[in-house]
Image (spheres, helix red, strand yellow):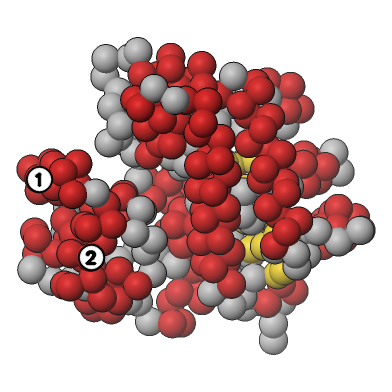
Amino acid sequence: MKAACGRPADTPALGLCLAGPTASGKTAIALSLAEHLPLEIISVDSALVYRGMDIGTAKPTVDERARVAHHLIDILEPDQTYSAARFAADAQRLALDIRGRGKLPLLVGGTMLYFKALRDGLDAMPPADAQTRAAIDAEAAAQGWPSMHQQLAAVDPLTAARLAPADAQRIQRALEVWRVSGKPLSAWHAQTKRRSGDIRAAAAQWPLVALEPDSRAWLHERIARRCDTMFSDGLIAEVQALQQQATLHADLPSMRCVGYRQIWSALNRGDGRTARDEVVAATRQLAKRQLTWLRSITDRKVLACDGESADIEALALLQAMALEVAR
């Protein structure tokens, strides 16, 4: 016998997940749901963890965070690192605490690797190697990341095929794994993949609603408007202030976030105000990757976030699922 939301009846759900590409309306829907149900929000966003990165991350405002408790926001300095494994442990702990207070944990964001870590678990991987990473970064500085992507394609074509030539962080990690272990990243993934039954049981604890627009043009327009707002709100000045911090540099994970990476580079070239189109293009590419990953999640509940009654439909579905999770 199956329970609602497609999860086994003997598998208790811990929290409800709301995922979607950037600019799809996740925050507004989450805040609307908070007006109807007692809940606390756990951010699933690899950029919101950093202090001082507010404009370019579209961080919830002080007022929004006062209306409903938010977690995993502003927990690190930009020169620190955060991992998917740490997120999964933090989210699990926070969800149990929130449930203990009689509220619903609502996990909201667009960092799909974090959702994967929580719902599917992570593959065993070689640990990070600082010396190898430094060597890769030095090569990339001289040759460019597209050239490093070609290197990756020669040793790990499966991983290279799913990465954009400018996806520096993931290309770096894939090359690092190859150089440290002599085995491609794709082979590690295949070797350590867990049994499908185990994955289903873990995922059932975190039922997921995906905001997916039917119209790509609709999402592109929202992305362009959001980027324009960020620039008018002072995004360039925010990145300039970060550049003044002695501990920060362009190769940090925080400074590789979409928007920050493009503006940092443009400022170094002396033409920061021309970065707007680069940021829009990079954000569109990010949204495309997010949607691709979402569509690979077979147990998700899909909401067309660009429909005329999308907000009403989203609220109704989330309320129904939240009540089921709360049982």
**Residue under label 1:** 135
The answer, for residue 320, to whether it is visible in the render is no
Give the residue displayed 69% in from the left and 82% down from the top.
Answer: 2
The C terminus lies in quadrant = bottom right
Residue 315, given in percent of the width and then of the height, sits at 84, 54
Quadrant housing residue 161: bottom left
Give the residue displayed 35% in from the left and 77% down from the top.
Answer: 194
The first of marks 2 and 1 along the sequence is 1
> Looking at the picture, does residue 94 appear above or below residue 269?
below
In the picture, measured across the screen, residue 46 lies left or right of residue 125, that is: right
Q: Report the amino acid beneath label 2.
A: Gln
**Residue under label 2:** 150
The N terminus lies in quadrant = bottom right
Give the residue displayed 57% in from the left and 53% down from the top.
Answer: 284
Residue 279, given in percent of the width and then of the height, sits at 53, 40
> Looking at the picture, does residue 32 appear above or below residue 165?
above
**Tag 2, which secondary structure?**
helix
In the picture, measured across the screen, residue 304 lies left or right of residue 178, that is: right
Q: Residues within 10 Å of mark 2 (few under 14, many from 20)?
A: some
Residue 66, given in percent of the width and then of the height, sits at 72, 23
